[in-house]
Structures are given as structure tokens and as C-alpha cells.
Image (cartoon, grey):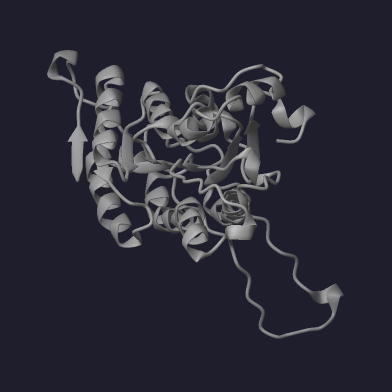
Amino acid sequence: MTRDSSPPPSRGGPAGRVRSEPGQKAPRRSTPRTTATSRTSSASTARPRPRRAPAGHGSTPSLDTGVLVTGGASGIGRATALAVAEAGRPVAVWDVDGDGAIETAELCARAHGVRTHAAAVDVVDSAAHGPALADALVALGSVGGFVHAAGISGPMSVDFLDEAAWDPVFDVNVRAAALLLRALLDPFRAAGPGSAAVLVSSIEGLFGSAMLTAYCSSKAAVLGLMRSVAHRYALDGFRVNAVCPGAVATPMLVPAFELPGFRERIEERTPLGRIADPAEIARPIRFLLSEEASFVTGTHLVIDGGMTAVTAI
């Protein structure tokens, strides 16, 4: 299911922002290479590695390009779509819940007057990535931002863990993120300098939780993926970072909140004394996508109200 959402005609003017003409975009800068006519084992005669000019430095950043948000039907994904739309950027919203994705896209269009695109996409289905991404590029004109907010938990300790409990968590949280980052390399190159991605990890990726074996493992893997791809994407002037939220009021935590005393215990262990709203995670994500974070890559930002500063999770 796909749908393009545009702001109502009463807003006046074209939906979305005017993009830079192709001639204004900085060319991709590749790493210069040297060739040797003969081999030598002498360190003194080895050629020094050439220095590469900073890719994208001094170029017009692609901050009017579209942002693809997975898991955008609710929670952190929906809040992120709204946050980047508020900054004036077109938004593509993907979620296995197609109706929820459409609702988010329509909220972005109505509230902020940006071009949007919604698609019912199961991120585990890698065959769906290409067609859905092609549709998003047509609808938005470009994609220079990516947020992987799709995720599942799967509470289970290692005692009872099997493939059926392990594989889906890694498929959604890690595998899909890696394959989408691969698919987005060419769109990012086309969008130009300023392109950036943010992966949603968790404080559970930094610390162990006995009843969340697969989830903890997958969120730690997300951080490893982020670091590796940040290194690779830097060759093209693109940035990749991650956020590690603590307890957030999202549908994923609703079952836990129904347990007697759970919410109260979390609030007591959090110095700020409360659960985060999804928008409080979305705003730092928007920062990491922006030019304000132009020298930030390959790292993670913990957003947990101070919990991990003073105690174990």
C-alpha cells in the first residue's frame, strides 16, 4: 500500500520546498589513489598515503532533501517524521502498519506543508525495499536522510531462546537497517553533501538485561553497524550516528507499563523522574540529521533522563 500525501490546496503555493538545481550540487569527491610501478619492501621508499580533501566541506548541504523514516506509524518513528517535517524536509513514512504510515504522512503534510509519501513496508522483506524507495524518490524528489526507527523487542531470557525468538528481532532491528543503508548509498550520493542517517539503538545495547537477550544483542549490533557504515560513508561525505533511548512512552512499552509497579520503578531510577515522550527522542534525531551536527559521525547519543549515569538499567 502506498500513498502520496500533499498539504491541502488552501495552504497555497507548491507543497514542499524548492530543491536546489542539479548544477548547485557539489560533485562527489572520491579518494585519490596512487599507483606504483614497482614493489619495494623498504619503508623509507614507500609512498605516503595521500590526504583526502574533506568530502562536502564548504559545499551546499542537502538539508532540503527527503528523509525516509521506518517504523513511522507510531512512537519514535512518528515523532521523528513530524520533527523533520517541522524543519521543512519532505518525509517518506514506512511501516508494516500501512494505515498508520498514511496517517503519519497526512499529519506531516497538514501540519507543516511538506511533501510526503507513505508505504506499507515490512522492512524484513528486502525485495520490497527497491520498489518502495523508487516510489519515495519520485514523490519527494530526493532522499538525503534516513532514520531506522522500526524495531521489535521479544522479551525472553537465554534459557528459553530459540531461532523463532532470535531471528525476527535481528531481522528487523539489524538486518533491515544494514540492507537499507546499502540501498540508500546511491540516493545519498545523488542528494549530495549533508546526507545523514540515524539508527535507533537503546540503552539496552549498552547494558545487559537478563530477560531481553535478543533485544540487547540486536541493539548492541546496531551500534557496531553504525560505526562500520559511518566509516564507509565518510568517503562520500555522509554521516551515520545512533541514538540510545531509555524508557519512552511508545506502543512497545505498553505491555510493560501494565505490570504492577513497573512504571513507578522506572521513574524512581531515572534522575529526571519520568518516562520520555517520543518527541524528546525525535528532536535529537533531527539534530543529528541537520547541518548543526556536520562534524558528528560514528557515535551514539544516550537519551535516558540520566538513568545510566547513576545506575544500571
Decide which of 253, 261 is in the foreground and name it.
Answer: 261
Instruction: Answer left or right for 278 relative to 89.
Output: right
In this rendering, the answer to whether 223 lies above or below 11 is: below
Instruction: Answer left or right for 148 relative to 214.
Output: left
Would residue 43 be visible to someone looking at this image? yes
Query: Residue 288, position in %: x, y?
Result: 55, 33
User: Which residue lies at the image location 59% right of the left edge and 62% below the top edge?
Assistant: 32
Decide which of 60, 187 is in the foreground and name it.
Answer: 187
User: Which residue lies at the image location 23% right of the left edge and 36% below the top edge?
Assistant: 99
Instruction: Answer left or right for 303 relative to 199.
Output: right
- The number of callouts visible is 0
In this rendering, the answer to whether 45 lies above or below 202 is: below
Q: In which quarter of the image is residue 105?
A: top left
Would residue 18 be visible to someone looking at this image? no
Query: Residue 116, position in %: x, y?
Result: 26, 33
User: Which residue lies at the image location 13% right of the left edge and 19% below the top edge?
Assistant: 9
- Check the image and name the residue furthest to the left: 9
Decide which of 217, 102 is in the foreground and name it.
Answer: 217
- Check the image and name the residue furthest to the front: 260
Query: Residue 215, position in %: x, y?
Result: 57, 49
Query: Residue 41, position in %: x, y?
Result: 82, 83
User: Which residue lies at the image location 42% right of the left edge and 51% below the top edge?
Assistant: 189
Decide which of 53, 259 is in the foreground and name it.
Answer: 259
> Quarter holding the C terminus?
top right
